[in-house]
Amino acid sequence: MLPVATLRVLLVLQALAPPTGPAIPDVALERRLAAALGAGVGDTIRLGTAAGTFPWRVRVAAVYEPRADPAAVPRRESQLVVHLPDLERMLGAVDRVDRFAVALRPGLAADSAAAELNRVAFGFRAHPSVEIASESSQTFRVVSRFHRAIAVIAIVASAIFLLCIMLLKVDERRLDAAAMRLVGVGRRTVFSALLLEACFISAVGSAIGVGLGWLAGSLVNAYYRRFFETQMVFALITSDIVWFSLGLSLILGLAAGTVAAWRLLRVQPLALWRRE
Amino acid sequence: MTVHPPFKTGRARLMASSLPLTALRNLQRHRGRTALSLAGIAVTAAMLLDMVLLSGGIERSFERLLLGRGFQIRISPQGTLPFDTEASIPESGRLEQRIRAVPGVEVVAPMLGGSLHALRGDSLVTLFGYGVEPDAQSLYELESGADLMPGDTTGLLLSGPASRLTGARPGDTVAILGRLDPQLMAARVERHLVARGTARWLYDYRGQPSVGIPLPVMQALQLERAEERVSAFAVRLHEGVDVDSVVRVLRREVPEVEVTSVAALVAGFRERLVYFRQLSYILATISLIIAFLLLSTLLTITVNERLGEIATIRAIGTSRGRVAAQIIFEGAFLTILGGGVGAMLGMATARYLDRILTSFPGLPATISFFVPDPSRLAAAAAVLLLTGSLAGGFPAYRAASLSIAQALRMEAP
């Protein structure tokens, strides 16, 4: 097992003028923090655990872009990475860590290793990474469930809207349908013509909808990337989503077209003509 | 032909009073279409209602939670929010004295939070411990049994989940362990405390096993050295004292800590949950657009179908205003009916959506995302009604500006 220890702590930072003195510890600054402090590689900053006192001088050895983490984005916390012995010294917490990350030899099961550690554990608990990932993704599962529920409401609203529009659209064609029937065009042909029209409107509307969705997704991404200063993707339109939307709107359009055309063709052509 | 100005003469008043009946009759002509439109408006109104509840609900709920015990200010380690990190405030006793000395401050409630362990048989169970001063606390409401008393050093308050986890009831003694040493396989501190009662911890997430312990005991269980250290303070001010001015004084007097008013905490919370607020605005706007499009399409087609009829009633002396009012009223009528159904539907979906969102891990169980605010709801209803009426604007204009002769010619068989 290869243990990696971590110690998280709140540090107060103060930007400082050029470095002085030998062998000061190196730190890596998150890009956003470096920008906020106006510090770059080679600069020296001072650290402290309370406002007003900055007893430790450190050198910025690297500026890094942190991995996009949806859990951290809304918190807008800034991070810097310090060598563990340096941080222990700064905090006066020698030989003390928050947690260990453990890499197992190939072939060893994480579950059984964690169970073995927990069997003898006292004051700590071992968790397989999968379990931690599952726990930490709980937030996103909740958001995902919320999105799905909202999507269902949006789909119901859109479906009713689509049905209504298609019914009205086909209903508007009743004079044409009556005329076609009166000059001898068969029911099936009129029905097919109305259905084809409904299909065409649904297909064009769906294509425009996909375009609008893509545009809205791009705007959402541009806005939130700027807002949270991150490269994360907030709105992702996958091919599955596109096919689902296209399929659903086509099915709804066709269903509405069928119902409306069927209702229209049940009525005698003369009666249709008179209704107009 | 003389056209009377609408709503001025007795006949016009009579006609105005018949607007609802006429609208109802017109809508009954195509029942299926009307029902579908009502369903569409109901769903969009439900969505609008939900989004209005969501837009500010969490903030109101959070504010209510923070002010529930009457403490208007929180003091936490510099750069943090209370209980947001594991950072703590040293020399808390002296700091408390300095805070108390600030004019306007009535009560200062120190608190220390952290993990503790309890023995149940041979097993250890992990609990969250709150160190409190019983006579000044902002964290719990007593549910059963007795409260901790000032000076009590052997008492303990349990949350429901902690009671179930430890198997302890009021009156039982619980062995609480602190500062476990994995190398020595022993706890450095152990206290046998008597459960005085059970309490509802205001900031606990659902199922959190919490215990309340007198602050000095908690400090002994948590801290390496004998010292006065707390996670945060809650401050209650005398009635009528301006919170912002006391916050300014506190920031000047105790610069080594973070002084935050509840209003600022709510603002910080709002910042973190900005996504939900923006989502609610976007979806509410989309709801209104869909309602508008649906109604305007329906009314436009209805007007197109009734051109001959409209031309006829214009020809017998009905004014343009009356015709336009009729169309706009139909839109408003549909909106009111659909909105009514939508309000009921919206309340049901809000409860369902709230159940989803309140299952966020780590969120206080007392928080709600969908909280009604009468003024916002009234504004949303007014906007929906206005949207419904505006949706009738174009068809109403078309109907009112109709050339009678041309329409009658077009409609002639």
Image: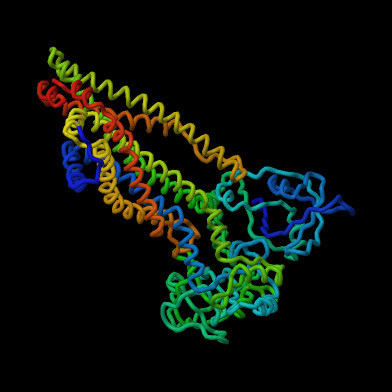
Which residue ends up furthest to the front in the rendered image?
Answer: B2
Q: Nearer the viewer, residue B19 or B368?
A: B19
Q: From the top left corner, tell me how far across and down residue B282 is, in percent.
A: 45, 44
Quadrant containing the C terminus of chain A is top left
Q: Is residue B400 left or right of residue A18?
A: left
- Which residue is at 57% across, 68% downward? B115
- Which residue is at 48% across, 71% downward? B68
Q: From the top left corner, tell me how far across and down residue A252 is, in percent.
A: 29, 32
Residue A265 seen in the current view: yes
- Which residue is at 68% across, 68% downward? B251
Q: Nearer the viewer, residue A266 or B93?
A: A266
Count all numbered tags in the image, as a single digit: 0
Q: From the top left corner, tell me how far across and down residue B293 is, in percent.
A: 34, 36
Residue A94 seen in the current view: no
- Which residue is at 44% across, 74% downward? B163
Q: Nearer the viewer, residue A1 or A170?
A: A170
- The relative height of residue A96 versus residue A226 in the rendered view (above or below) is below
